Image (cartoon, helix red, strand yellow):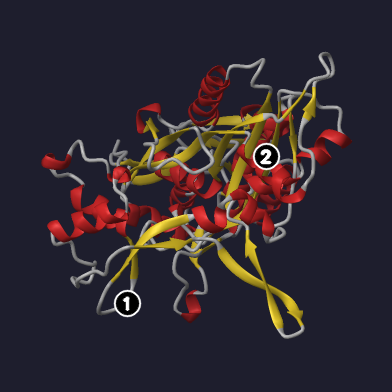
Amino acid sequence: MVKNVTLDQIVSLCKRCGFVYPTSEIYGGLASSYDYGPLGTELLRNIKNSFWRYFVTNRSDIVGLDSQIILHPKTWEASGHTTGFVEPVVEDTITKRRYRADHLVEDFVKGKEKFKDFVVEELDTKGLDGFIKAHNIKSPDGNTLSVSKFFNTLVETKLGVLEGKKNIAYLRGETAQGIFSNFKNVIDSTRIRLPFGIAQIGKSFRNEITKGQFVFRTVEFEQAEIEYFFNPGESRWKDLYKDWQDQMLRFVTETLGVDKNNLTWRRHTDRERSHYSRETYDLDYRFPFGYKELWGIAYRTDFDLKSHAKYTGVDFSYTDLISGRKFIPHVIEPAVGINRVFLMILCDSYKKDVKNKRLYLSLKPFLAPYKVAVFPLVRNNKEIVKKSREVFNNLKGHFSAIFDDRGNIGKRYFAQDEVGTPWCVTIDYDSLKDNTVTIRDRDTTKQKRIKISELKNFVLFNI
């Protein structure tokens, strides 16, 4: 069994099978932008549903929120994003293409023994410029690079026209600020009490410079963030922090089924850590292009609520019902990119069965775009086709299913293996006699007979 996978293999699979397409491909594409096809849409939805079920539905201390993509512009001033949401960028002096300076340095040192202890995050812009100059690092096109400058990754937009002047707004760079600005509303309109969390899944936007990592880093992406508020006088932040790290790891390994050996924790350096954070760790996954951030967790203290209180004059303090003491809650924030989870799952489940010359995705059944595929053994037998349609129609109302009568059975099996369908059901001549079908397991390829009347419950029980 071959488990290693290249990014090119994943990109090819996604395009071929309808997981991901390049955005605006008929116009030549759009940098760092992708559309999700029929199967990709289903997988994304299953990922989001599993996150919500695990962290919100199954808990009594977390509630949900869905805030707007465009918030009041001063939101981003208060949060520090208009000045602190920046990345070091250099420019190819010939092509004028822009690149992340830290990523070029990171690519240069990768795999070199002399740089095994090198940490690129510890370099500021002067340090990056010095390193690029000292090692004569060129652009991907082989040209010299400009000195690095900070580039704000917030995406600007315009809202209407007022007396000839356009009003600048921003597409949100994170979903968190909609949570913080609604903190008082949640407190006033629900019966929830500290410690508690507010969760949100939604689109965010960043002016990305880095290209070539598929859906890992894109202009438009989906985040799943939780702001977990607590009383710093009663709860030790380090204990809550460790508990959240454990929950994150359990969700990825136990719920999503990802190999623990492909995961590692990495602590942010003081220079790398965001302006709002006192402590930050990343749960990194071993993607085909190396270990990269999957899920971050930050101790944001009371930075955000205090900042919004300062800018608006709104009192964001919380009153303890027993002591009557007022204070600003502190926050621990686990924040994950759904698109990165999507890519991780594809990479981790990608398997090559050399013996049987097949490729399959060993997805957890609840994640699979299709839970079951229904095949008529032959296409030219009206009774078998009719029976197959009856079985399919009985199943599709309970979970996602697909009907396939193209080509021979072997090719149909392999096509469903490739997209991760856990079970394939074949209706044959015996089905017409005894109302049984052949059901085939994706991972083991083993087959058995099962009654049609038991088929729905079999699938429901196993997903």
Q: Amino acid at mark 1?
A: Lys
Q: Residue 191 location in percent, x, y?
A: 86, 27
Kind of element beneath mark 1: loop
Q: Which mark is residue 408?
A: none
- Local packing at callout 2 (Cα closer than 10 Å; few below 14, some 14-19, many 20+) is many
Q: Amino acid at mark 2?
A: Lys
Kind of element beneath mark 2: helix
**Residue wearing tag 1:** 96
Q: CA distance from mark 1 to mark 2?
A: 41 Å
The N terminus appears in which quarter of the rendering? top left
Q: Is residue 391 something one can see in this rendering?
A: no
- Local packing at callout 1 (Cα closer than 10 Å; few below 14, some 14-19, many 20+) is few
**Outermost bottom residue:** 164
Q: Are marks 1 and 2 in contact (CB under 8 Å)?
A: no
Quarter of the figure with residue 425: top right
Identify the residue at image location x=80%, y=20%: 320
**Residue wearing tag 2:** 306
Q: Is residue 357 above or below residue 230?
A: below
Identify the residue at image location x=31%, y=55%: 125
Q: Residue 138 location in percent, x, y?
A: 19, 66
The C terminus appears in which quarter of the rendering? top right
Q: Residue 149 location in percent, x, y?
A: 36, 63
Q: Nearer the viewer, residue 402 or 281?
A: 281
Q: Residue 344 location in percent, x, y?
A: 44, 43
